[in-house]
Image: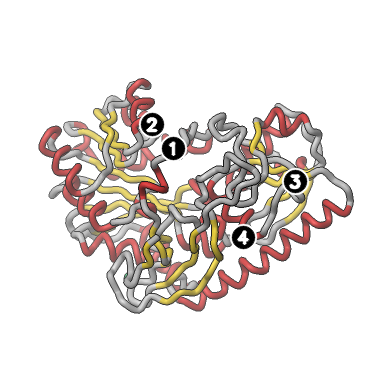
Amino acid sequence: MRAIDRCRGCSGKGIEPFFDLGMQPLANALARDRAAADPVHPLSLSWCPDCGLVQLNHTADPGELFSEYVWVTASSSTAKAYAERFCDRVLDLAGDAVRGGYVLEAASNDGTFLKPFQARGLRVLGVDPARNIADLAVADGVPTENAFFGRKSAERIVSEHGLPAVVFARNVLPHVADPHDFVEGLRLCAGERGLAIIEVHYAKAILDELHYDSIYHEHLCYFTLQSLERLLEAHGLFAFEAMISPISGGSVVLFARGVRAEKGPVLAGLESAERAEAVNDLARWREFADKALRHRELLVGLLEQEAEAGRRVVGYGASARSSTMLNFCGLGPDRIAAVADQNRLKQGFFTPGTHIPILAPEQVMAQGPDTVVVLAWNFMDEIGDLLWDRFGFRGGIIAPLPFPPRKTDIREVRGG
Ligand SMILES: [Zn+2]
């Protein structure tokens, strides 16, 4: 791992560390061997006084992060419903220009977000660095190239296909080691008239709801509108409108073009809320770090009560985010007997560092748990319905986040 000495966004030199989560394993590096110790790396955050960007202090070697572990993520129903809404809003803002052109997605994953554009008769093209996922998308009818997105691949795409009318990148910019090269690629694709769209897990949501579980080695930058706009503007992209998205439990979408324009009502409103609530100030982020420590005490306390009462506790969702929370709180198989995950590629492994067995939901629920900790808490409604309908679960639920962690009954969390 390399330590940074300047801001990833604005290159400012005065970055200040404010939250140390200790040495942690890579969140996606599921363990094969319960008895062996996993490699650990420093995990800590800094804040930039110049642009307000919150960021990891260390950058992992991308080979280590992505080479072995590429989990195919079947899209959730939340994501699918949002993909439709996203498409409608993009077409609203793109205007008629989009009809003659095509829609490009950088890091397009399985093509879920390109499909609604296709369904509305538009040409689409995806770019994704994971070969198995790109192949999957192609097999599913979404043209997808297997490449890392950046300035070079953007140049090639533009020379082969022409300028896209719309280029979008969802939940990828915070994960790239060179955000400047990535944004340069977007700027190139946007050209003089195109629409560039960026979606990120919103640092204000992370701050307000204490999403400290979203801090892991792959997630390098935690953008506010201020820090993101500053980065975009350095490359000649100017945001003119925004939209809030449900992804990751609270994301923001910025719509930008290569020319400055008056800011729309949603963007203006969000920017003024950021200022009013001092979201870009170090003091707020120090509070965040203190609150995470308090969260740990409360969550560990809840699980101790369960153990004392002799209740059997299992977890649901072996996501990267759950890895940070389990490791930060020191929760292992003595507190959570097993973690259910629908992704077959994860089953049979153990959670990184904490070594809780990951099993199929059927297997975990067959153990007759009294309480389920919903580690993938941002899918609470979906998981609540699944537990109730498919497994007939009628026990206790622990929602670790948003802060404060709480225990409730399955009847209270069922969506729909
Ligand atoms: Zn900065």
Task: Please report the residue visible at 49 percent of the width from the left and 63 percent of the height from the top.
Answer: 42
Residue 314 in the image: above or below residue 1: above
Cα distance between the residues tagged 2 and 3: 33 Å
Position of residue 222 measured from the top left corner of the image (x, y, whole percent): 43, 61
Q: Residue furthest right?
A: 309
Residue 328 numbered tag: 4
Cα distance between the residues tagged 4 and 1: 24 Å
Amino acid type, mark 2: Ile
> 269 left or right of 235?
right
Instruction: Decide which of tag 1 and tag 3 comes sooner along the chain.
Output: 1
Amino acid type, mark 3: Ile
> 199 left or right of 325?
left
Amino acid type, mark 1: Val
Residue 397 numbered tag: 3
Instruction: Decide which of tag 4 and tag 1 comes sooner along the chain.
Output: 1
Instruction: Decide which of tag 4 and tag 3 comes sooner along the chain.
Output: 4
Residue 70 numbered tag: 1
Circles 1 and 2, Cβ within 8 Å, touching? The answer is yes
- For marks 2 and 3, give the one nearer the viewer: 2
Q: Residue furthest left?
A: 159
Cα distance between the residues tagged 1 and 2: 8 Å
- Find disc 2 in the rendering and name its residue: 133
Residue 374 in the image: above or below residue 344: below
Image label count: 4
| Towards the viewer: 388 or 29 | 29
At mark 2, the secondary structure is helix
Task: Please report the residue visible at 82 percent of the width from the left and 43 percent of the height from the top.
Answer: 312
Cα distance between the residues tagged 4 and 3: 21 Å
Quarter of image, res 149: top left
